[in-house]
Image: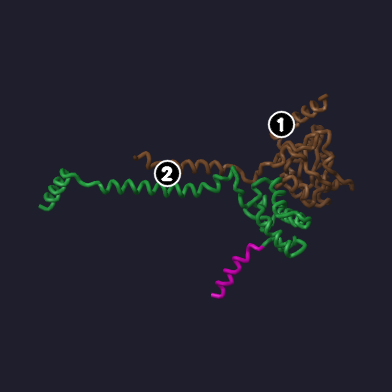
Amino acid sequence: MKLKALVPLFVFAGLVIAFGFGLTRDPSLLPSEMIDRPFPAFELKDLYTEDMVTEEVFKNEVSLVNVFGSWCVSCEIEHPKLMELGRNETVRLIGVDWRDTEEKGKRWLARNGNPYDQVIFDGESRLAIDLGVTGAPESFLVDPSGNIRYKHVGIITDEVWSDILEPIVNNLRIENTQATLQP
Amino acid sequence: MRVFILIFALVFAAPLSASAQDVVAGSDAQELRARDVGRKLRCVVCQNQSIEESDAQLARDMRVVVRERMADGQSDAEIIDYMRERYGDYVLLKPPVQTNTYALWFLPLVLVLGMLFWLVRFNRRRVAVETRQLSDAERVQLNKMLEDDST
């Protein structure tokens, strides 16, 4: 009889634990809907030239797409790592200058260095919304067929690169080599 | 009294649609529809507000996208699906009723029913205990105790 009276208490405790666990999760980190889906089609101007860039830019090589902006403080913190990746030619870097003016974007890159093989100017968030971007910096790994394979929200630190992104890049390269060797 | 009414009115005037300031769709009917859709979409930056209310830049850009798609002839459902495909179910302010949200929608009802059920069971047992009659031996003992008390 006494134990049965404690059932509501146990139910409550169970709920507290379940909800408490839920509170530890960060709602601002939206899971990416775009994994394993083709990079959305787009046609945007290159930041420096008058050329238009489309999703064809991803063919034949693994790419790291980095969404940044001159207004983004975290992007400045992340930038040295991208400069390092650019110097070592580790992976093709495609920048997306988001919600900027061309002036400010170019000035920011002049000041902080430009590691990108190409910079796409997305002043009106068209590509960003198509990618499900909620803030900067955010980075995507795109395979040589143009499919998004991974999304990283936040700064790419040394650990993020070596523990998460680099292995994926290597796997994608192996995958691509295997695919091209298929008879 | 007039001051009170004024303050009361101002409090309710505060949450104006942010889109009233800049982005406007083609026709009035379209604008109303666009605001309706916008009120259903969560601003992914300021996550407690809809894209209509939020001042965030991204919210403004999303409002533009909604109006452009509407002008293109897309239906409300198509525009909402577009956002959902990119941002996930979380972009909907009202969670959809589907397998992984059954607990969210029905748990409160289940808990309330469970509590009511528990209370009914508990009360029934207590009533049963109270109506147990005294046995003869206990009645004699009770009378004796009462007599002893009164002397």
> Is A2 rendered above or below residue B40?
above
Palette colour of chain A: brown
Whether residue A81 is visible, yes or no, is no
Q: Is residue B12 magenta?
A: yes
Residue with the mark numbered 1:
A162
Q: Mark 2 points at which residue?
A: A8
Disc 1 residue type? Ser
Viewer-side label of 1, 2 = 2
Which region is colored magenta?
Answer: B1-16
Residue B21 screen position, x and y as percent: 72, 63
Magenta segment main secondary structure: helix
Q: Position of residue B72 (x, y in %)?
A: 79, 55
- Check disc 1 and report its element: helix, strand or loop: helix
Chain letter for the residue marked with disc 2 in the picture: A
Q: Chain B is drawn in which colour?
A: green
Q: Which amino acid does label 2 sit on?
A: Pro
Which quadrant does the C terminus of chain A fall into?
top right
- Judge whether residue A17 can be spotted in this image: yes
- Return the residue nearer the eye: A65 or A83: A65
What residue is shown at x 78% (from left), y 50% (from top)? Answer: A126
Residue A3 left/right relative to A107: left
Crowding near the residue tagged with mark 1, few <14, some 14–19, many ≥20 C-alpha atoms within 10 Å: few
How far apart are the alpha carbons under marks 1 and 2?
48 Å
